[in-house]
Every structure is written in C-alpha cells, then in structure tokens.
Image (cartoon, rainbow, N blue to C red):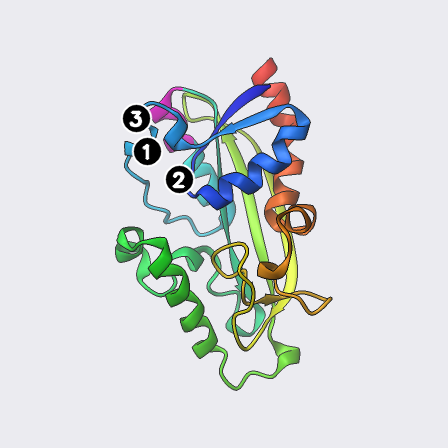
Amino acid sequence: MTEVVVATTNAKKLGEIRAVFAPLGLRALGLGDVPGGDAIAEPVEDGATFEANALLKAAHYARAIGRVCLADDSGLEVDALGGDPGVHSAYYAHGLEEGPRVAREVRDPANNAKLLRALEGVPERERTARFVCVMAVADPEGNALATSRGEFEGRIGEAARGANGFGYDPLLVLEDGRTSAELSPEEKNARSHRGAAARGIAGALLEILRG
C-alpha cells in the first residue's frame, strides 16, 4: 500500500476516503496518524472557492508535516440561497472566527437548523441543492500537484432524516427519496461528491507518490 496523509481529524470523512482509496492501493493516514499532525494549527479558510480552500489547506499541512498531503474542501450549495452556504458550510451557524472552536456535535445541528430556517416557505421544487467536494494535493514545499472535483445533486428536505454520514447529510434528499444520511456507507461512497473527487484524484496520487 502507498501511504498519503489526508489533512483531517474528522474520522467519518477519513473513513469515506479510506474506503475509496484502499482498493486502489492507497492507504489514507489522518493527521492523528502522523507525529504532531493533530497539533498543527488550522489555517484560516478564507478562499472564495472550494478549490482555493482545498489548495490552501493542502499546502499548509504539507509544509508543516514535510510530506505530500491531500486536503479537501466541501460544502453545500443551495440554489434558492444563491449558492449559500457554499464555502462557509462548515461554519454557517457560527461564522469563520468562532466556528473552528465549536465542537462538531454542536456545530452540525446548528448549521442544519439555520439552513431550515433560511428555507422556510420555499416550495419543494425550488429547494434544489448539491454537495461539492474539491480535493487537492500539495508537495512538502506547498506546491499544488493535482486537484479533483465531485458533486452530489438533490434537494433540501423539510426535516433531518437518517443516522449515517455527518454535516448536512440528513437534509439532502436524493432522487429516490432517501437522504444522504439514509444511504449505507457503500452506497454513499459510490454516489457522493467525496467519493467522486477521491476516485478522480487517486490516479494522480499514485503517480506522484510512486514517482
């Protein structure tokens, strides 16, 4: 197996990436698997696009660790809200300054509640939305090496459903009527934005790491 450091401490996100990478011969390490990795200060994610934030994070952690590093930036785009919460998805309810200090188990429900409030009165046909994930790889000097993008279409339901996944998964209703949080991990990896981005970047990663 060829190892790659993924710049995350989110166990569920890391698990999704590992499930895609393992059959391809890539072993994904989280920041907690690298000495001192989980003590690295998080960069300010102030990019205007998912691509900018993914590249920013990949370069930041690659320089800090001294290894090729993969990072992703992902979020939810809601058409009725002009694409919001977009790049601010992770900290939608608390803001960019306070958000990183709020535990995920508090942050996720608060984000979902704010989104439902923002869409009150919006009819079902106008609640179209998509998850977006951009993955980026940087070398130890912080140079960008590759990027990949995936999207996952649906609409925002009127209440959260499902116990799988994380973030906005319980709110994104798919064509078959289930939410992203009602999919099995295997189904989600086969269909999701993160699965698509991971598959898209895996070949480039193998060439980079083996070369």
Which amino acid type is marked by label 3?
Answer: Gly
Question: Are the residues flagged by discs 3 and 1 in contact, CB closer than 8 Å?
Answer: yes
Where in the figure is residue 13, as x and y percent of width and height? 50, 44
In the image as oriented, which residue stretches furthest toward the right? 176
Give the residue drawn at x 43%, y 20%.
67
In the rendered image, residue 175, in percent from the top left (x then y), is placed at 72, 66
Quickly name the residue at label 2: 9
Predominant SS along the magenta part: helix
Q: Which residue is mark 3?
A: 36
Q: Return the x and y of residue 76 as percentages of the image width and height.
A: 52, 60
Q: Amino acid at mark 1?
A: Asp
| Nearer to me, 198 or 83 | 198
Q: Is residue 116 left or right of residue 149?
A: left
Q: Which residue is mark 1?
A: 38
Position above or below: 115 against 145: below
**Would residue 8 appear left or right of 154 to someone viewing this image?**
left
C-alpha distance separating marks 3 and 1: 6 Å
| Magenta span includes 128 | no
> Crowding at label 3, few (<14), some or many (≥20) Cα neighbours within 10 Å?
few
Secondary structure category for the residue under label 2: loop
The boundaries of the magenta stretch are: 59-66
Identify the element where label 3 is drawn.
loop
